Amino acid sequence: MAFAIAIDGPAGAGKSTIAKRVAKALGFVYVDTGAMYRAITLGCMRQGFDPAREVEKTIAALPSLHVELTPQGQVLLNGEDVSKAIRTEECSRLTSPTSAIPQVRTYLVAQQRQMAASADVVMDGRDIGTNVLPGAQVKIFMVASPQTRAHRRYLEEVARGEKADESQILQDIIQRDYNDSHRPTDPLKQAEDAILLDTSDLDVDQVVAKVLEAVAPKLEVARA
C-alpha cells in the first residue's frame, strides 16, 4: 500500500520547499498540486482569456490542457516546461479564483489521486488532507504570519530577477487567504487529524526535521 504525506496551508507558508526536501529525504515522489493549478491558469491566459472571469471558457479548455509533473521537478503544460512561467505574480493572482472552479478541481484531483495510488508521495496544496487524500497517513497543516509569507515571496521573486512590491504581495496574500478559505468547493482548512506547524520563526532545516519526526513512527508501522 502506498504511503502518503499531505502538507496543506496558505500561500507562502513554505509547503513546496518543505515537501520537496521531505520527499527527497524519504525517496518519495513529490506532487506539487499548486503548480498543477497554476499550469491550468497559465494555459487559459495563453488562450487569451481570464480563467477566473470566463468560467465557461475555462471549463471548455480543460481537455486541451495536459499537465505533467516530471521526476526532475519540472512542470509541463502540453509538453512545454512552464516551471518559471507559472510563477509570475499575474499567474499567482489568477490561480486562486481559477482553482475555486469546481470543474477545475475535479479535473486535477482525479489526476492527483491516481499519482498517490501508484507511488509513495508527499503532496502539498490547500485541501490534500481534507479532500484529495483524506486517508493520508500523515497530515501537516503548515502556517506562518502573512507578513512572513509576503517577505518570503518577495525574496523569491527578487531572486528570479523580477520586480517585486512587498506591500502588494502582502495584500495579495491576505486576499488569497480569504479566497482560499471561503471558496464553496474544498476550502482551505485544517483537517481534524492534521498536525499544526507554524513556520514563522523556523528555518527550512528545522521544519523538515519536525515533519520527518512526525512521519517516522507512522512509516515504521506501515512498513512493519
Image (spheres, rainbow, N blue to C red):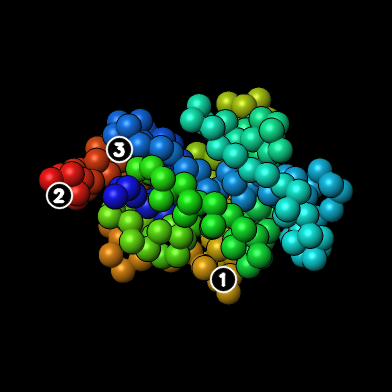
Compare residues 133 and 41 and report the one nearer the observer: 133
Quadrant location of residue 178? bottom right
Residue bearing mark 2: 221
The three-letter code of the residue at mark 1 reads Thr
Q: Is residue 135 above or below residue 185?
A: above
Residue 211 lies, in percent from the top left, at 27, 44
Q: Nearer the viewer, mark 1 or mark 2?
A: 2
Q: SS at mark 3?
A: helix
The three-letter code of the residue at mark 2 reads Val
Please say whether residue 147 is visible from this viewpoint: no
Compare residues 41 and 136 and report the one nearer the observer: 136
In the drawing, does residue 209 fall left or right of residue 106? Answer: left
Q: In percent of the image, x 58 and y 55: which residue is there? A: 108
The three-letter code of the residue at mark 3 reads Val
Residue bearing mark 1: 185
Q: SS at mark 1?
A: loop
Quadrant location of residue 141? bottom left
The answer to whether the residues at label 1 and label 2 have Cβ atoms under 8 Å apart is: no
Q: Could you tell me how many numbered marks the image carries?
A: 3
The answer to whether the residues at label 2 and label 3 have Cβ atoms under 8 Å apart is: no
In the drawing, does residue 143 fall left or right of residue 176? Answer: left
Q: Is residue 103 above or below residue 157?
A: below
For label 3, the crowd category at 10 Å Cα-Cα, with few meaning under 14, some 14 to 19 and many 20 or more, is: some
